Image (cartoon, rainbow, N blue to C red):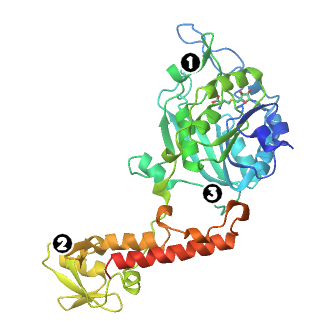
Amino acid sequence: MLSKENYFNKILQGDCIEVMKELPDKSVDLIFADPPYNLQLSHELYRPNQTKVEGVFDEWDKFESMQSYDNFTQAWLKECRRVLKDDGTIWVIGSYHNIFRVGAIIQNLDFWLLNDVIWVKSNPMPNFKGTRFNNAHETLIWASKNKGANYTFHYKALKVFNDDLQMRSDWYIPICSGEERIKVNGQKAHSTQKPAELLYRVILSSSNPNDIILDPFNGSGTTAAVAKRLGRNYIGIERESFYIEVTEERLKKIKPLEKNLLEHPIEKPQIKVPFGNLIEKGMIKVGELLYAANGKANAQVLADASIVWNEQVGSIHKISASILNKPNNNGWKFWYVERENKKILIDDLRQSYIDVFIGKLPDNEIKIPKNKVKSKSKANTRQEVEAMLREAVEEAQKETLITQTI
Ligand SMILES: C[S@@+](CC[C@H](N)C(=O)[O-])C[C@H]1O[C@@H](n2cnc3c(N)ncnc32)[C@H](O)[C@@H]1O
């Protein structure tokens, strides 16, 4: 078995089935696999102007029969399943030549299909012979290890990415060309280099910074390159030493983005604080008045956290909606309380509640008394540190309550 320093952020040479056997069980968070498609192209292709089409005629794409392709697919997917963590997911890309066989095998191995994503090529290669439809897409299968697995999916981040519209399963991305296409001595370094945008979307949506991403068919290293850029760790496996050299050169030029640019704050669940919590904590007093922004309406707070206005009783939301003549309204953004002759939005009080009581208190506001901290040689136990932090938080809470003059 390989030790972590021998596979972590490395491109390993060899047959992926054999190399994966050297990786520990449940050691990777995400797999992206772009296996041979078994295109079965038997003769060279020419454009109408007699120039040769650079298709995929590589030896690595050739299999004796469909059965041998299936056996190979089953073997590498089985190893993928073993090395994938229980909450990890796998992406496999393919074309009509192979994707249906791959899909059946994935299901037979008990993976749970989450989506098939269609990569629509906005600039596909034409069908030169004019004998079929222009083949303008490839398919990605996305699957979790088991049904009901707690896998990573940055739904909200992808929605923002897509101008606040749910990200759909059809992705319009151009094929890899121009500057992006790696060339060696004027020739394409790899016949099937995938566009980085495709991997960007895959990695961003289904992994977290510092995760380990495995690509068993590394090729020119698109997965490793995007993983590195996005602050993830990679493991690439590739048989051909030439492609490994190409990848190493490519990786040298990649600078990871800074950590603070990679977080997904938008994914953090909104903390729910009911209005009653502020009353329980004395941040809003029973009997005090809540004011509308224009000062025209005011309502009185009752002990059960309902408010009364114009003989109507209801929640902060219901009463504000009634005043505005709307079916519903967010009362947190409507009502103000008076503190030291100033009007304060109750939503700001709610934020103070979250900061103080739900644990967003910045470290620099937690002051642990110096006399309680032991010297380095006689360090505090974990329990002591936790007790000190609890005490310090309680002190800070008292102070906040006092400064809020409640
Ligand atoms: C479709 S390409 C991957 C291209 C890659 N996604 C990229 O963007 O460059 C498949 C790659 O897998 C490699 N390969 C094929 N069979 C393999 C095997 N059994 N083990 C490891 N690598 C293999 C091939 O040499 C080829 O580079």
* Kind of residue indicated by mark 3: Tyr
Say which residue appears at 34% left-offset and 92% top-offset: 303
**For the residue labelled by badge 2, is the local secondary structure a helix, a strand or a loop?**
loop
**For the residue labelled by badge 1, is the local secondary structure a helix, a strand or a loop?**
loop
- Looking at the rendered image, the disc whose residue lies closer to the viewer, 3 or 2, is 2
- Pick the residue in front: 200 or 279: 279
- Pick the residue in front: 81 or 317: 317
* Kind of residue indicated by mark 1: Lys
Q: Tell me which image quadrant ligand 1 sits in.
A: top right
Q: Is residue 213 above or below residue 369?
A: above
Q: Residue furthest left?
A: 296
CA gap, disc 3 to disc 2?
A: 44 Å
Say which residue appears at 69% left-offset and 36% top-offset: 98
Q: Position of residue 295 (x, y in %)?
A: 14, 76
Asked if residue 126 shows in the view, the reply is no
Q: Which mark is residue 178?
A: none
Q: Where does label 3 land, which residue? A: 151
Q: Is residue 241 above or below residue 269?
A: above
Q: Quadrant of the C terminus?
A: bottom left
Q: Position of residue 289 (x, y in %)?
A: 22, 85
Say which residue appears at 17% left-offset and 88% top-offset: 310
* Kind of residue indicated by mark 2: Ala
Q: Which mark is residue 293?
A: 2
CA gap, disc 1 to disc 2?
A: 71 Å
Q: Where does label 1 land, which residue? A: 129
Say which residue appears at 24% left-offset and 75% top-offset: 336
Asked if residue 341 shows in the view, the reply is yes
**For the residue labelled by badge 3, is the local secondary structure a helix, a strand or a loop?**
loop
